[in-house]
Image (cartoon, rainbow, N blue to C red):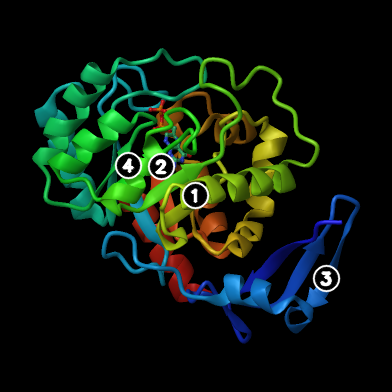
Amino acid sequence: MKRYYRPIALRGEGLPLAGGWLNFREIEEITREGSRRIPADAAPSHVLEALSAPRADVAGLSLDAPRIMGIVNTTPDSFSDGGRLTTTEAAIAHAKTLASQGAHILDIGGESTRPGADFVEIEEEIARTAPVIEGLEARVSIDTRKAAVAEAALGAGAAMLNDVSGLIFDPEMAPLAARSGAPICVMHSKGDPKTMQQDPRYENVLLDVYDALETQIAMAEAAGVARSQVIVDPGIGFGKTLEHNLMLLKGLSLLHSLGCAILLGASRKRFIGTISEVETADQRVAGSLAVALVGAAQGAQILRVHDVEETRQALALWQAST
Ligand code: HH2
């Protein structure tokens, strides 16, 4: 039976977790039938190696501390900030503000992937994103499922790819990542944004997402992408119920055993509003900060957020006081 190894992350003595700011002494050994705690040194050596090795830099950014990815949506219809940045100038100005607040990467997106969102044509998505990227000096990632949009973004100066379909939507995405050498975030998603929230089901959401990401990493490697250039993301809210999201957050550190850096995108999402009883997305900042700290405490290297200044403050205090 397949065994999964989830490090119990802590601040203090132990083996380094992904060469970063946390350590671990114990591991939760999980099967589809149950789990138990074992001392770290009882795990297979290849697992310990995957769990503790430092992760490669992402576009020159070291991942030995939690890093902030600031969200810049140039869409009319994003769930939280849609319609605010519909001109190139407004998007560039917002991106510069986020960079000045401490964003290490800016994630530029031209197609909303909220549940039920409409498809955007390639030309339109390029027209929304490429001029913004051209106008920025900061480190930029392109949030797209389409290889042609990603290629235009790389030409405009983007340094990282972020594919919410996890290489599934466009078969040209993995070859593009291989050719360009750009790091690529492979996110787990169940189905298309149009339909993904219609009764998503898993046998065991944490293990099912782990297995899917393992397959997606193998797809990337088969196309010639170096494993060190793959960043994994559980895809909070993408074909997940509230309970699924919470189980993924609680078990997030399992993904370290894939040997890749982890990106967590939970900012302002619906489950935060449901739990905290806040209907309006841009009022969910405090709940989003709490989830960002959960991510940092489980070793997620990149936190994708709308509220960069607030996240920077929260992380600084969390790191100083733990
Ligand atoms: N979430 C969204 C978009 N892109 N990329 C990654 N890697 N991980 C995520 O969780 C993720 C993502 C959805 O959020 P947002 O961009 O704020 O909204 P919209 O899709 O409506 O533009």
Amino acid found under the numbered disc labelled 4: Leu
Give percent across and percent down for residue 171. Answer: 43, 32
Distance, label 1 to label 4, CA atoms, is: 13 Å
Query: How busy is the neighbourhood of tag 1: few (under 14 within 10 Å), some, or many (20 plus)?
Result: few
Q: Is the shortest distance between ligand 1 and the CB of mark 1 under 8 Å?
A: no
- Ligand 1 sits in which quadrant? top left
- The quarter of the displayed image where residue 196 is located: top right
Of circles 1 and 2, the one toward us is 1
Of circles 3 and 4, the one toward us is 4
Give percent across and percent down for residue 4. Answer: 75, 60
Which quadrant: the N terminus? bottom right
> Left or right of 104: which side holds 66?
right
Q: Is residue 7 above or below residue 194?
A: below
Q: Which residue is mark 2?
A: 174
Residue found at the very far right of the displayed protein: 33
Query: Which residue occupies 74% across, 83% down?
Result: 41
Q: Which residue is mark 1?
A: 222
Amino acid found under the numbered disc labelled 3: Arg
Distance, label 3 to label 4, CA atoms, is: 41 Å
